[in-house]
Amino acid sequence: MTKLTEHAREAVLQATPDACSEQRERRRFLTTLSLAAGAAFALPVIAQQGARMNGANASGKRTIFITGSTSGMGRRLAERLAAPGTTILVHGRSRQRGDEVMKAIQDAGGEARFYAADFSSLADVSSLADAVMKDNDRLDVLVNNAGIYLGEPESRQISQDGHELRFAINYLAPFALTHRLAPLLKASRPARIINVASAGQNAIDFDNVMLERGYSHQRAYGQSKLALIMFTIDIAQELKGAGVTVNAVHPANYMDTPMTRDAGIRPWNSVDEGADAVLRLINAPELAETTGLYFSGERPSRASSQAYDAADRARLRTLSRQLANI
């Protein structure tokens, strides 16, 4: 991957939706994603105090929860992590697809449990967290992977709770789930949380968070993914000293997934290339104490500037706690 010029780096940092033209906005969004994969920025590492992490507990057994793991990259992660001593918690909306993934895990010698939940409902998310806490005595890794991009029609949609749909599924659901599972993660230390974000990021307008004005799929998706990165930085600080690390990652550009194909985009990368980046955050011993960072692929990178605005993160945190009843 060629090194970015200073102008290209600035484009990554400052990319925002073009309110005047949907076509120009789409081109700019696609260009941002393309450029970001080559961006590598040195960021301060927030040192995690406490036990050093090595990707597994002392017994060598692990329980790994991957949301959105019945298709796309989530499914490939589940298949590649499957091994004796590993329990994969599979999540999706289709029991049939869940059974297919569980069989693949079991055929590889691993154990699996399936949990059905609709992330457009915060009640479903709460019930999911309760079930995971009840069924499992430990949780070593949480991968917040479930998400949506496009849909039909190209118009604003709302969740079961009345929130903008992409903000609800891509951000509010993992925000609520992570908070509700935090006690189990802390009790299982060392543990890791990986939030699957995106290089396509749009700033959050706190006077129009639910995008009742100026809606577009790109804008909705981009702000939901930036919110997830802002949450990553925040909760990494909250969990400092608890033996749990949290990082966000843009796995790869336009992976061959239903999300990419549904958007009418020709895939650039395989799901395995994206899975490589996530697996490194799950397993790499050298990242044992790395927390609060955003990665592009396998390298530390820099998110949109709003992610590093403490005042905006505080506003988002307060709003999210209210919406999710946390």
Image: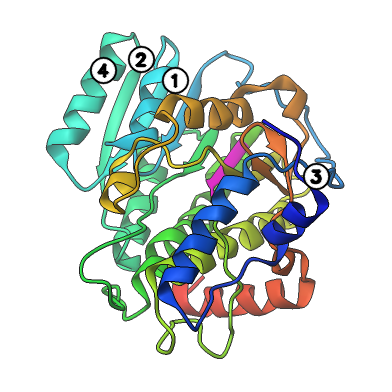
- The front one of 26 and 115 is 26
Question: Residue 80: image x %, image y %?
Answer: 42, 18
Magenta span main SS: strand
- Give the crowd class for mark 3: few <14, some 14-19, many >=20 residues within 10 Å: some
In the picture, the disc for residue 110 is 2
Look at discs 3 and 4 and give the one toward the viewer: 3
Please report the bounds of the magenta region as a residue range: 192-197
- Give the crowd class for mark 1: few <14, some 14-19, many >=20 residues within 10 Å: some
Say what amino acid the circle numbered 3 marks.
Phe
- Give the crowd class for mark 4: few <14, some 14-19, many >=20 residues within 10 Å: some
- The front one of 49 and 171 is 171
The Cα–Cα distance between marks 4 and 1, rounded to whole angstroms, is 11 Å
- Residue 191 position by quadrant: top right
Question: Do residues under tags 1 and 2 come within 8 Å of each other at their CB atoms?
Answer: yes
Say what amino acid the circle numbered 1 marks.
Leu
Look at discs 3 and 1 and give the one toward the viewer: 3
